[in-house]
Image (cartoon, rainbow, N blue to C red):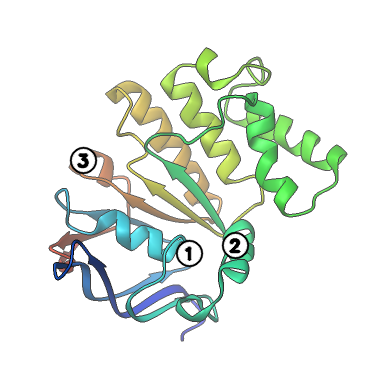
């Protein structure tokens, strides 16, 4: 694999058994290469396989067939404990539903991934505070998600995603639950991370949001049908 390629999918299939004999192919032989530092948008209608593809790249799911490389690791062959380590170290996730823990403050939510990577309490507290300041939430770090607006929750999620300084940011419909103005703020943060050298892979159905990316791949029925 070339040194500038950070992610590679080779003939990746993902098949689900729905009922006794009903097989659904969410991905059907997908091939894809993502360069280090690239901003890629994955587009397509509902049910096209976009989220399945991102979950596979993010080590949240394993393919039924084919190979997925994250740098030199063939993650399609790794055990869950190894996948968890790679996820925590190399990948940051931003979800449409934010996925913050409601009983924790913004500061505690951002510190959580650093706990799993064994960072000492003083360091993770300092870094979480810096990250929340960075996304403009220095005055809200002790608030819980229910006390924050949707846009503020997504900014907490962005701070959490970059807590361990991952190389890859996976954003699954990051503006899906936001109004257009707030969504633009989130996209601006993704652009900023891209300029800082992060690899961004964003799932979106919104063609205006996708314009932020350098490259766009269109999925339909589990197959890449067009690249721009």
The crowd level at tag 1 (other Cα within 10 Å; few <14, some 14-19, many 20+) is many
Task: Identify the residue position indicated by label 1 in the image.
Answer: 59
Q: CA distance from mark 1 to mark 3?
A: 25 Å
- Reply above or below: 157 against 20: above
- Reply above or below: 189 against 77: above
- Reply above or below: 192 against 136: below
**Residue sitting at x 79%, y 53%:** 118
Asked which secondary structure carries label 3, the reply is: loop
Residue 25 occupies quadrant: bottom left
* Side of 150 where 12 appears, left or right: left
The crowd level at tag 2 (other Cα within 10 Å; few <14, some 14-19, many 20+) is some
Kindly indicate whether the residue at mark 3 contacts the one at mark 2 (C-beta within 8 angstroms).
no
**Residue sitting at x 54%, y 13%:** 147
Task: Identify the residue position indicated by label 2 in the image.
Answer: 84
Q: CA distance from mark 1 to mark 2?
A: 8 Å
Residue 206, numbered circle: 3
Asked which secondary structure carries label 2, the reply is: helix
Which is more foreground, mark 2 or mark 3? 2
Kindly indicate whether the residue at mark 2 contacts the one at mark 1 (C-beta within 8 angstroms).
yes
> In front: 88, or 196?
88
Q: Position of residue 142 (x, y in %)?
A: 68, 18
* Side of 215 where 120 appears, left or right: right
> In front: 116, or 5?
116
Question: Tag count in the figure?
Answer: 3
Which is more foreground, mark 1 or mark 3? 1
């Amino acid at each position: 694999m070339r040194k500038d390629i950070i992610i590679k999918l080779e003939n990746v299939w993902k098949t689900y058994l729905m009922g006794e004999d009903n097989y659904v192919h969410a991905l059907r032989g997908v091939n894809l290469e993502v360069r280090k530092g690239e901003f890629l948008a994955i587009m397509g209608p509902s049910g096209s396989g976009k989220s399945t593809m991102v979950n596979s790249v993010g080590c949240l799911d394993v393919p039924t067939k084919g190979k997925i490389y994250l740098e030199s690791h063939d993650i399609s062959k790794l055990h869950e404990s190894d996948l968890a380590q790679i996820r925590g170290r190399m990948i940051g996730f931003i979800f449409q539903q934010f996925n913050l823990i409601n009983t924790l403050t913004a500061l505690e939510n951002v510190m959580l991934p650093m706990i799993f990577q064994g960072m000492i309490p003083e360091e993770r507290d300092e870094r979480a505070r810096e990250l929340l300041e960075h996304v403009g939430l220095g005055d809200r770090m002790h608030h819980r998600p229910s006390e924050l607006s949707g846009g503020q929750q997504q900014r907490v999620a962005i701070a959490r995603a970059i807590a361990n300084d991952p190389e890859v940011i996976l954003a699954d419909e990051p503006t899906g639950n936001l109004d257009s103005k707030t969504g633009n703020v989130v996209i601006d943060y993704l652009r900023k991370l891209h300029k800082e050298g992060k690899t961004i892979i964003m799932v979106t159905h919104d063609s205006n949001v996708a314009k932020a990316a350098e490259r766009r791949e269109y999925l339909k029925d589990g197959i890449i049908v067009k690249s721009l």
